[in-house]
Amino acid sequence: MININEVTETNQMIEKENLDVRTITLGISLLDCISSDLDTLLDNIYTRITTLAKDLVKTGMEIEREFAIPVVNKRISVTPIGIVGAAACKSPEDFVKIASVLDKAAKEVGVNFLGGYSALCAKGMTKAERMLIESIPEALSKTERICSSVALGSTRTGINMDAVALMGRIIKSTAEATADTDSLGCAKLVVFCNAPDDNPFMAGAFHGVTEADAVINVGVSGPGVIKHALEGIKGKDFEVLAETVKRTAFKITRLGQLVAKEASKRLGIPFGIVDLSLAPTPAIGDSISDILELMGLERTGAPGTTAALALLNDQVKKGGLMASSYVGGLSGSFIPVSEDQGMINAVNSGSLTIEKLEAMTCICSVGLDMIAIPGSTSASTISGIIADEMAIGMVNQKTTAVRLIPVIGKDVGDEAVFGGLLGRAPIMRVNQFSCEDFISRGGRIPAPVHGFRN
């Protein structure tokens, strides 16, 4: 039973501490839309999405109004289009047509993002997946709500370095194709190692082939709530710190479970998972960096930052696991730069570098996220950064991702402005030494020895 004190406490979290349900994401399988005729495929995709998702936004708004719980985003993820379009698409331009139809469907049902313009290339790349990847710059420059992701490796398969090299060039081309908006297209493009099938967060969401026909996944967020809780225990030991984070994460996740179950019931679609990640926003006080600094760091990036993040991530998971029967997605702590004012401040002060962020990705729930770099950065350097991050994920058996934004026409000391939830980002310095000969070797980095388990 929920008592009145818990109700009052939850209201406090919502009204003053930025607690919200970050997203209700409807996952939709498009496997039964597949056709060898492109026009038929396009019609099937549009009809399926607009039929299944017609009440998604309305239901989210009703739950928000009736329960007084902010539901910030309503989103859709679909089966990776590299699979769905394989039979019908004969060129990258054909895949762009699918992207346009997905964008049209997203606008029709009113969601802010639709994820799944994706290719799964962890071990190898089909002809269709290569065409989809080659289409990404045009697709993201011609659509508003489409998000794209590419899986480049896993602990079981190793790292597909041919795909890593290709994605360096594609990210650079996407930046150039959207140069008039500070290379915004790259903010909707992410590459993964160990990509999860049930991630509700963009830009990496897609509806995995192991999933049901349709499913409701919810992502919760509450950095401001954790921050408020830690303000009351300054100077306490690590046991008190850990217990405080764990108990607070439990309360945050219970709210997500409530919303997920209610959305599932009203839409008549099975509940999938709650992703209990702490996802920051540009709002003051809604920052992962602020939490780390409340733990005792002068500035995020100082010695001790990775240890502080490890404690935070672990206790968030422990508390959340007790609050929901089905926890999935990424679940941990996001450390994007552009979406977190505290991270921006740390970069501007010189305490936080890409190298320190890379060390922190051994711990956090994703990886190098929403990082703006000079537009002059070479494609091979971008691929090298990706390869490093894929290696961290592969060896540590965890999800890692890279969302780099080479901002055309800007350099270190400048700032990119993306707007809304994507925020703004200072251009970060990148190591100038070349890795081109390494990236151009081709082939696959083998899986680690501990990946061979049955």
Image: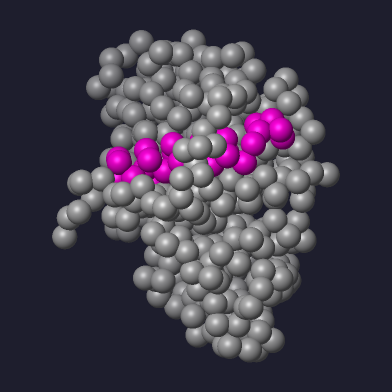
Q: Tell me what residue is drawn at x 38 percent, y 16 percent.
A: 304
| Left or right: 1, with 336 as reference point | left
Q: Tell me what residue is drawn at x 50 percent, y 54 percent.
A: 163
Magenta part, dominant SS: helix
- Decide whether residue 320 is among the magenta residues: no
Report the magenta residues as a range: 373-401
| Left or right: 321, with 340 as reference point | left
Q: Tell me what residue is drawn at x 23 percent, y 50 percent.
A: 451
Q: Which of the two residues, 152 or 400, is positioned nearer the viewer here?
A: 152
Q: Is residue 349 above or below residue 26?
A: above
Q: Quadrant of residue 396?
A: top left
Q: Can you say which quadrant of the picture contains the C terminus?
A: bottom left
Q: Is residue 78 above or below residue 5?
A: below
Q: Quadrant of residue 87?
A: bottom right
Q: Position of residue 259 (x, y in %)?
A: 47, 58
Q: Is residue 49 above or below residue 324?
A: below
Q: Position of residue 251 (x, y in %)?
A: 38, 42
Q: Is residue 180 above or below residue 328?
A: above
Q: Position of residue 184 (x, y in %)?
A: 72, 45
| Left or right: 316, with 148 as reference point | left
